[in-house]
Image (cartoon, rainbow, N blue to C red):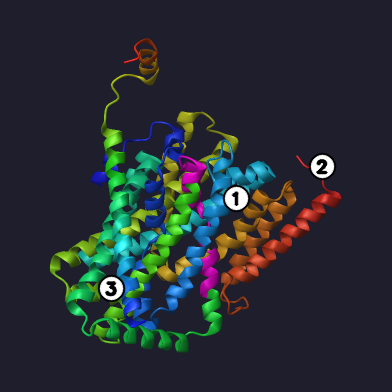
Amino acid sequence: MFVAFRARTAREYADFSIARRTLPLALIFGSLCATYVGPAFSIGFVGRGFHSGFLFLLIGLAYSLQNIVVGLWVAPKLRELKDCYTLGDAIGQKYGPRCQVLAGLISVLLCTLFSAVMISAGGVVLNDIFGLPPRLSVTVVAIVTASYTAFGGLRASVITDAYHFALFALLLPGILLFELLFRFDGGATAFYQQAMATTASGFQTTSPLEIVSFVMAFLLGETLIPPYANLALASKTTAVSRNGFVFAGLFSMLWFAVMIALGVVAKAVLPGSTGEDYVLLTLVKFTMPHAAYALLLVALVSIVVSSLDSLLNAGAVVFTQDIIRRFAARQDSAALKAGRYSTVAIAAVGAGMALFVPSVIKGLLICYSIWAPAILPALFLGLWIRHPRPLAGLLSMAVGTVVAILLQLETFVKTGVGAILPALICSLLAYALGHYAHGLFGRPNR
Amino acid sequence: MKLALLALVVVAAGVVILSGVWVGAALVAAIWHVERPSPTPPDDRAGQTAESPE
């Protein structure tokens, strides 16, 4: 909270939404990493390392690759666009205002769903630490995060993210080095044998189809979700935008290796029946000084909050820019006010939905499955095709969203490889159909 | 090979820690920049530069 309030209040809409495009490389990199390192990439990965060794490092490399590809080829192209505050703006510039509104609606829906998952995760951590009732924990997380995000906008979000990043980038590798030096018996040979045995067991217990579905989710699920897109647009230069994503991708490889190694070390120390989500907490609780455990709990809250503030700010900016400003609030002060109210509204809706989130991983997988097919084909093809056609963008986004949501329903046919791949194929086919139909029957391009 | 795996993990942990230090330093610089009061408005400063080269 102290760091959040040291970041000044946003006084103009450009400050609130894209921090006046002044963010340097270190802050873009720190904020990107703090946003993607949520509960799944910390607690979840340590648990996966405990049960399946380095298998999940190989799967996680798909995520690293995605960040590097976005950094090299997509983020600089986005940053080059003039007067662009959101992905919706980029889509609007390529396909027209209708597509911008649809992209805005999909983005706000996804930001709200992601926020609900993060608020739920934060509520669980507060519940574990202080024993607060679930409703109260969820409310505290939502109010604290929304308060500084609503006033400080993107700059406050990025500054608190950098603080949170520095905290957990020092703490978690520190825990690993402490465990390796003082708790792990047998040295390099024992570590190697433990890692190989756990990894072999991971390959035996995970089917190839499961591995494919995980790789797809890691490769596409979080690609350029609104908080990342906002950071690409808020970078000081195109080079900062490119390098921020590339460095974040390279960093993720190292981060996954550290988390998995913690899981492997824990395997030699904890009983095999330890639940996946409790490996990290139990390891630190029983093998390190109390101060380290207390610091870890603070770091876990900050991991959740740093993901949540980025989602709230991105959702608010998208709602204001892609939807409200299409029809009203065109003046700067009105847009700033709309952005602040939207932040609070998304936090409130997210907090209400958080009570119904089945589990963090399940919630995230649902969001991933919708985002990739709904937005990515239209966005990427729009950036690369010389004259993108509005009908193609509209059909691709609509079909991708509807198919992805239908595939989530229990009654619908389960594909075995998750919803992303089939929904993505439908979205691409719809794009191709729209492209040629517009060419045959449509009016000349804008 | 056995030593290499542990060495890679230790190097990865070291680089993650260094990244934290780098971002922490940038954070301090960013907060300091925000806190530092601007002595004169930008337009005035530009005028002063034009008139007094020192």
Residue A139 to residue A192: above or below: above
Distance, label 2 to label 3, CA atoms, is: 59 Å
Between label 1 and label 3, give the one nearer the viewer.
3
Q: Which mark is residue A216?
A: none
Upstream in sequence: badge 1 or badge 3: 1
- Label 1: chain letter: A
Q: Nearer the viewer, mark 2 or mark 1?
A: 2
Q: Residue at x 56, y 81 (%)?
A: A209
Residue at (40% x, 61% y) in the render: A251
Report the disc number at residue A103.
1
Evaluate whether label 2 is on the same chain as label 1. Answer: yes
- Where residue A284 sits: x, y (%)? 21, 72
Could you tell me which secondary element the residue under label 1 belongs to?
helix
Q: First in sequence, mark 2 or 1: give its number.
A: 1
Marking on residue A444: 2
Residue A374, by quadrant, is bottom right
**Picture coordinates of residue A36, whole percent (x, y):** 41, 59
Judged from the image, the secondary structure of the residue bearing numbered disc 3 is: helix
Q: Which image quarter holds the C terminus of chain A?
A: top right
- The amino acid pointed to by label 2 is Pro
The answer, for residue A139, to whether it is visible in the render is no
Mark 2, chain letter? A
The chain letter for the residue carrying disc 3 is: A
Q: Hey, what amino acid is under mark 3?
A: Leu
Q: Is residue B13 visible?
A: yes
**Magenta segment includes A426:** no
Residue linked to disc 3: A280
